[in-house]
Amino acid sequence: MKATLVGMGSVGRALVTLLAQRQRSGGHRPGTPEIRAVVDSRGARLARAGQPLDLEALVAAKAQGVPVHRAEAAGGLGVEAGGPEWSQRLIAESGTELLIEAGPTDLKRPATAMGHLRAAMASGMHVVCVNKAPLATAMPALLELAAYNRVGLRFSGCVGAGTPVLAMGEQLARGDRVRGISAVVNGTTNYILTQMRDAGQSFGEALAGAQQLGYAEADPSGDVDGWDTAMKMVILAAAVMGVKTTVGRSQVEGISKVTREAMAEAAARGKTIKLVGRAGEDGVSVGPAEVDRHGPLDVAGSINAVVFRCDTLGEVTLSGRGAGGPETATAILRDAEDLAKAAGADRGGR
Amino acid sequence: MKATLVGMGSVGRALVTLLAQRQRSGGHRPGTPEIRAVVDSRGARLARAGQPLDLEALVAAKAQGVPVHRAEAAGGLGVEAGGPEWSQRLIAESGTELLIEAGPTDLKRPATAMGHLRAAMASGMHVVCVNKAPLATAMPALLELAAYNRVGLRFSGCVGAGTPVLAMGEQLARGDRVRGISAVVNGTTNYILTQMRDAGQSFGEALAGAQQLGYAEADPSGDVDGWDTAMKMVILAAAVMGVKTTVGRSQVEGISKVTREAMAEAAARGKTIKLVGRAGEDGVSVGPAEVDRHGPLDVAGSINAVVFRCDTLGEVTLSGRGAGGPETATAILRDAEDLAKAAGADRGGR
């Protein structure tokens, strides 16, 4: 399926690298997307008819800080960013069948990514989105838009990176009913809380350490205040339980008020404090909570854990790495394959 | 999809009960099988044209020890078992599109269930099988038979009961490559080993206790000697890694030689002994092994844990209940739904 890729951050680069490897090894799998256009914040590069982009050259250029529109070695045509909504127009006119949205997630400014999704779906393009912000702020509207335009909208990479959290939830929801989900899905807060527990640091000390190591961003509010967890829970609630809610309607509390003392008291009772996201039939909440030490939610570092509570099956727990460019790229490939398969089945009769 | 159900043990009865509930609530989901024939060891009951079987009456009769061919209150026609291969002929002539094989798993006598699968596929019927024995002894041949007859063969309920272990593995195998699987998938041995560790019992004492409580069968060899675990690993290896092997070609050791002393020594090193099944590209092995205390494979009682080792994603762990009639019945429903969907897509163009 011909695809437009938006975003050349760690996920976009990992995806392009993976596809370049497949291109080189000649092992074309059905459903593997063919990247015909790449968009970053400063411009775009478009393949010329009949000629593929040189994906390795593109990654090499980005690694040296060259924006895609200047990466001449990759072949194709460079287009500089310009004018309002330029990227939306470019997507709509790309002549590709699939948008892969892997641009920066910014909960305060979801409009750019939202514009990309709308432009693509209005043009009849399927969408694979690993950008949480538009989904978490407008999931109900986006699902309607996809249905109205009869296109597929997939977003597995938004939760658990490559660990198939959404696919697992969808499986469980079929033969059984999922009543609730509890999850630890943010690596930054998990690192900070672990440092507070094991090294006896205060929140401030642990946060500073995380920033020094690059585990927390300069503005850590998205992670520390619980918004990243909230976005993921909203997406999980919609996909697995059919609960249509948004981040704005969720109860969200971060970990900045967690003290060393609370941590020590919890430990004395065989518990530990984690930032836990919960999804139920009445919506989503996020906040620090005591969980059993060595229990399913007591995971280390960047490992995510998700517990599904089901009517018949009881508790089912999935855990695995929750972050990483290559990990998220594998989720994009699975989603793209699903969309290609579904599109193929639709066309089967013609 | 019209279906023939073989087996009215705990799984068969749970399935029929679940379907009766759906029938009564009128909430027909697309892809829900319609049971038109039921087979147990002593006979069969066949629905009459245009009339459904009364599934609740059937379960009520079985609960009182009445074989299905005598359960007149369920409606339809009773047929007593008779003659060699009677059940195979009955399946082939059932006029149904789906066989649900939920008969007793007997690794020493897989021929009966095998005959059912062969008869169904040769007649163009799809198959949902929760009977491990035929799959574990002849998986390569059965997969070929399904492909040759262009029918679907699904068996999710064979591993992890309702916990979607196979579906998870298949997901992982798509965007990534699964290199190995380690798993604790047998509740009986898990109970015995836990008693040995926590109550300081010998293997013999713990086994006797398990038998008294009904956790172990009078002939416990299938569980205790590792064969149940081996069957599940063979099925996992085939479905997730494309490794076609059989129980006969696997290295299998049980837990009868595990001593209290070994258990205590492991504990002193922060380890615990579990019966671990392993699948790799070179086949399957089963045996007692030390795993980390509180690690992913240190699960309690009847909880199963499966760790998939992937190239890109690293370790992904799934855990949940690994046994139970209702749990396994949800897996059957998911499989039947998948088959109905695939059959519908095939027919889309006609």
Image: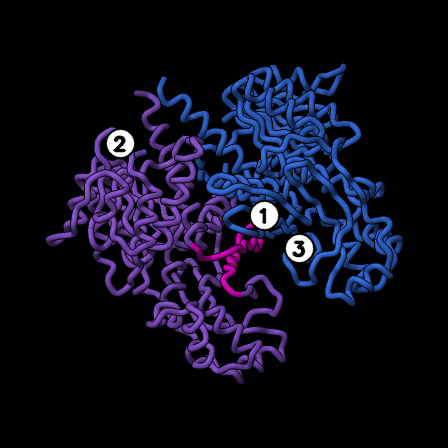
Chain colours: A purple, B blue
Q: Which residue is mark 2?
A: A51
Label 1 in the same subunit as label 2: no
User: For the residue marked with disc 2, what is the amino acid?
Assistant: Gln
What is the quadrant of residue A49 in the picture? top left
Label 1: chain letter: B
Q: Amino acid at mark 1?
A: Arg
Q: Which residue is at 61% across, 70% downward? A: A293
Task: Report the residue at 70% width, 38% height from top.
Answer: B284
2 or 3: mark nearer the eye: 2
Query: Mark 1 = which residue?
Result: B309
Q: Residue at x 69, y 52 (%)?
A: B302
Which residue does the image show at 53% across and 72% down from the upper left? A194
Q: Is residue B12 visible?
A: no
Residue flagged by tag 3: what amino acid is it? Leu
Q: Residues within 10 Å of mark 1 (few under 14, many from 20)?
A: some
Disc 2, SS: loop
Q: In the image as oriented, which residue stretches furthest toward the left?
A: A83
Query: Which residue was labeled with disc 3?
Result: B297
